[in-house]
Image (spheres, rainbow, N blue to C red):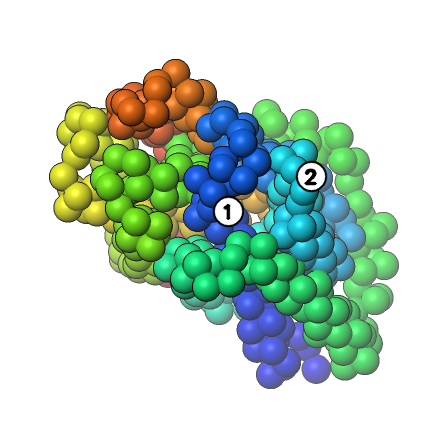
Amino acid sequence: MKKQESGYRWVVFGTVLFAYFLIVSQRTAPGLITDQLMKDFHVSASVIGLMSSIQFLAYAGFQIPAGLLSDRYGPNRFLIIGTLLTGLGSLLYSVSPNEYVMIFSRFLVGTGDATIFVNLILILNQWFKANEFVRLLGMISLVAGLGSLAATVPFSMWISFSGWRTTFLTIGIILVVFSYVLYNVLVSKPEKIFKDDSKGKKMAARERESIWLILRRMFSTRQAWATFLCHFGLVGTYIGFIGSWGVPYGIHVLGLSLSEASQLIMYGLFGAMIGGPFIGWVTSRLNSIKKIYTLIHIIVLSSWLVLFLTGVKPPFIVVVVLLFIIGFGSGASSLTFAVVRQSFPMKEVGVVTGFANMGGFLSAVLLPIVFGYILDLFPQHSINIGYHYGFIIPILFSIVGFIGVVIIKEEIVKKTVLSTS
């Protein structure tokens, strides 16, 4: 029996998707306790920005190596190791005695997280046929939104009830245990059911190409850089703000409580959850990724610009609408990987996916740090002015994303949509 025809593939799908859900929730959850960490560890906004960014720095830095290794040796064990590292990082985060241990713990989380998305895509590509895979991309986007959503009101209520250390300790234990579950589902059980796969792996090993040749070809390809820049401008600005300064913005500028500020962020997450499946459906109808993706980049850039132009204390409803639109645009990021999958041979999809994904999280690294430095320029009583000028950063980053979508090669992308619709 082939993997793509077995009922067991749905067990694999559900298991890896649940792991993805847990890990995504850990990307933005620390943003809920930004103010508390500043009080507990007596650190400045710029140090908190570094804490937030170190996770995304590790994530971005390991994207290309993760893609190369997964293309070459298979994705299963790397997904398991990544889940284990994320769990260990969360455990260490929960018991951190100072900011230095906390920074290292977030580095561990980012390292583990770096292996997840690339390997998730490759695992589903192994287990599902092309027409099924395209439909599942929308589900992946939805689960990512649910994971981020869990890190808003549910996590804030849990933290209020039991404290932030207990919350992160529990999640860490769950992830460590679940890494063992993944081993059984992805490695142990399939080796018994599908015994012929090892022959295919040996044949593929003989055809391996030089890593440096693959990297040189990728870095010299306009299409790869286009996807990198698209993700930099669309995903990084959203994740970087939501995961670090979104909740403090609601508290300090709009005068909200922790729970209310978490609900504010939730509107952006709802937008992302709706945006992914909806934009994918519209794109398949219009047979053009570039037209839709260009429109989305223009809308997101305009939203950040309006958020800046509304002044130091914009109306609450305006912020809600703009965050929803920005989240909706971020949901379109799956179009980046639609471009990658059809523009490059399958043996390079992992590394190019990692490179494109690195763009988004490099942006997510830079935004919290620069935003934090801008906030440190203003005294606490006028911090709303600091947030106002901080919005210049996502505006500039969104311009970079717009440049990326402009240089996408339309003729290649049209073949993509026609072949998958």
Element under label 2? helix
Q: Position of residue 135 (x, y in %)?
A: 43, 66
Element under label 1? helix
> Which mark sits nearer the N-terminus, 1 or 2?
1
Crowding at dot 1, Cα within 10 Å, few <14 / some 14-19 / many 20+, comes out as: many
Name the amino acid, label 2. Val
186 is higher (above) or lower (below) than 40? below
> Residue at horizontal 70%, vertical 82%?
1
> Residue at horizontal 63%, vertical 59%?
169
Q: Position of residue 113 (x, y in %)?
A: 62, 49
Mark 1–mark 2 Cα distance, whole angstroms, equals: 15 Å
Q: Nearer the viewer, residue 16 or 353?
A: 16
Q: Position of residue 99 (x, y in %)?
A: 63, 35
Crowding at dot 2, Cα within 10 Å, few <14 / some 14-19 / many 20+, comes out as: some
**Residue for badge 1:** 30
Name the amino acid, label 1. Pro
**Residue for badge 2:** 101
> Residue at horizontal 83%, vertical 67%?
198
Q: Position of residue 21 (x, y in %)?
A: 52, 62
Question: Given the current orientation, which residue lies at the most extreme top position?
Answer: 377
Report the side of 370 relative to 126 (left or right). Answer: left
